[in-house]
Amino acid sequence: MRDFGADHRWLSINTATVRKQNGHDWPLLQILDACAVRGIRAIAPWRDQVAAAGLAATARAVKAHGLKLSGYCRGGMFTYADAAGRQAVRDDNRRALDEACELGAACLVLVVGGLPGALAGKPVHKDIAAARAQVAEGVAVLLADARERGMPLAIEPLHPMYAADRACINTLEQALDLCDALDPARSGALGVAVDAYHVWWDPKLAAMIERTGRERLLALHVCDWLVPTRDLLEDRGMMGDGVIDLRALRALVEAQGYAGYSEVEIFSARNWWQRDGGEVLDTCIERHCRCV
Amino acid sequence: MRDFGADHRWLSINTATVRKQNGHDWPLLQILDACAVRGIRAIAPWRDQVAAAGLAATARAVKAHGLKLSGYCRGGMFTYADAAGRQAVRDDNRRALDEACELGAACLVLVVGGLPGALAGKPVHKDIAAARAQVAEGVAVLLADARERGMPLAIEPLHPMYAADRACINTLEQALDLCDALDPARSGALGVAVDAYHVWWDPKLAAMIERTGRERLLALHVCDWLVPTRDLLEDRGMMGDGVIDLRALRALVEAQGYAGYSEVEIFSARNWWQRDGGEVLDTCIERHCRCV
């Protein structure tokens, strides 16, 4: 197992972690500068942040700083209510793929979507099996494009509390079943993003990480589960502030041969987004050394 | 499949659903009266409500009204930090068993507990596997007493968002694995409570209900998952207000031969607990006919 205690060379910052500072949007290019001056070698930016900064300008800044992208957040949201929705989803995912390639991302992370309309508060039906079938179809279609472009797709199982509105793939086992169906050869074109927040509770976690194996372990995301958790979406904790045994999780992942970045992804409306962004990055570095 | 549309003979009211009316505690004996006058034939009371009303007085009222108990809420919370905690948990569960017997409950429902100390906001460790081992031990010990008393134990897998602080058994599969370990003969002494809110998201739901089988299907709880959900604990929805296909779930359960009560269990701090209790019971009856 790698020693993370001495330095932060394997730390990546998911830019949602500092999308706000002092309660206000922190522009992506400033985030990249702040990462670079701290010796952070990798990031994972969100599409809306890239769009606000401009794709070309972001790509230039990434290159100028010599930054790697541990992943690009995010494609997915495959579920739809009608034919127009289906086409819109396909087009949008193709654009996400283009952007991931332009930025040189290690993978395109997929948050697969829930019941159509649910994220807007108006689910059009209650048939989660149908939503899951649309997801399987959507990943299959995107995978063909992704293979051509050489961009791996990382399915991210989301915590079951997001099954209705954000992602109806909710366990590693379920994600791996889809990988088996679409890429039985384990080519590396399709795999999973293991996010501690989403999977830490799973009684089959160790078995499923073993089943994942090196070829499909495309990303490791870390943060912590707070007790109590006060909001379903924006109350993730800084590593060390919650109950997840992050080092044990990393041991499982590294036992499979994973040697990539450990990406800090924290949404925290009531805490970290209210602070100075540089202070948050410094805390991420310190906690990454001590707790991951 | 039974027809629930014409009457509410298979409706049970978990008394947490109306533990408050107009924002204030509604005494249990008044709840029982209000259920009885509406022709509700079964309830599932909570221990704290019974304690407030008095066990003997509650037992008398249950008998006088001819009410059945679809379950007794609840035993469990098996995890502990030290030897004194272990003994306290055992003693408390034995008392819960006595009360369930005194009230003639169909089963004692077990919410098994999370990381020791977590419910009070101070988890003493992060080892969820150790907590799960304590749960297995605690259920095994209680099962010996429960067999003697002829009181079935119903393990209730709780939604994974409660893994840290309320229950580290989070899927039906996990609960059934424990049943297999402790009661391989499927004697009926140990089974599960299937609560729609906790299990609706599970991609293996249909397979696991089939695996449960009649002998281990001890209770069915219903409510709904709201989109968005605003609180992790006290924002359950009335049947029909959310995204759970309750009729499909009941079909799965009844296909195994389940013919017991369908128990409405709603915690709703911002909505139903703020209303008149009689109005809430009337709504439960109407929605149970229409949506379950």
Image (cartoon, coloured by chain):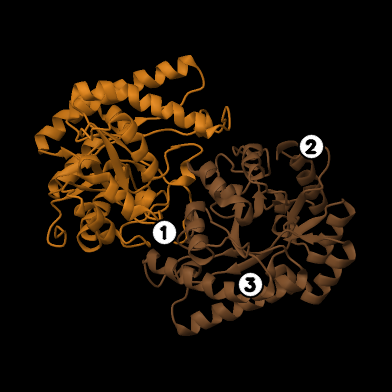
Chain colours: A orange, B brown
Q: Amino acid at mark 1?
A: Leu
**Chain of the residue under the numbered disc 3 shown in the image:** B
Q: Which residue is mark 1?
A: A226
C-beta proximity under 8 Å, tags 3 and 1: no
Does A82 sit left or right of B271 as displayed?
Answer: left
- Residue A120 is at least partly visible in this image: no
CA neighbours of label 3 inside 10 A, class few (<14), some (14 to 19), many (20+): some
What residue lies at 23% left-to-right and 45% top-to-bottom?
A213
Q: Which residue is mark 3?
A: B147
Q: Position of residue B79 (x, y in %)?
A: 48, 72
Q: Position of residue B244 (x, y in %)?
A: 60, 39
The relative height of residue B244 versus residue B278 in the rendered view (above or below) is above
Mark sitting on residue A150: none
What whole-number distance in Å separates the C-alpha atoms at marks 1 and 2? 43 Å
Which of discs 3 and 2 lies nearer the camera? The answer is: 3
Q: Amino acid at mark 2?
A: Gly
Q: Which residue is mark 2?
A: B5
Residue closest to the far front: B185
Name the secondary structure under disc 3: helix
Compare marks 3 and 2 and give the one earlier in the sequence: 2
Does A238 sit left or right of B217 as displayed?
Answer: left
Hey, which quadrant is residue B124 in on the image?
Answer: bottom left
**Depth check, front residue: A247 or B39:** B39
What residue lies at 10% left-to-right and 38% top-to-bottom?
A66
**Chain of the residue under the numbered disc 1 shown in the image:** A
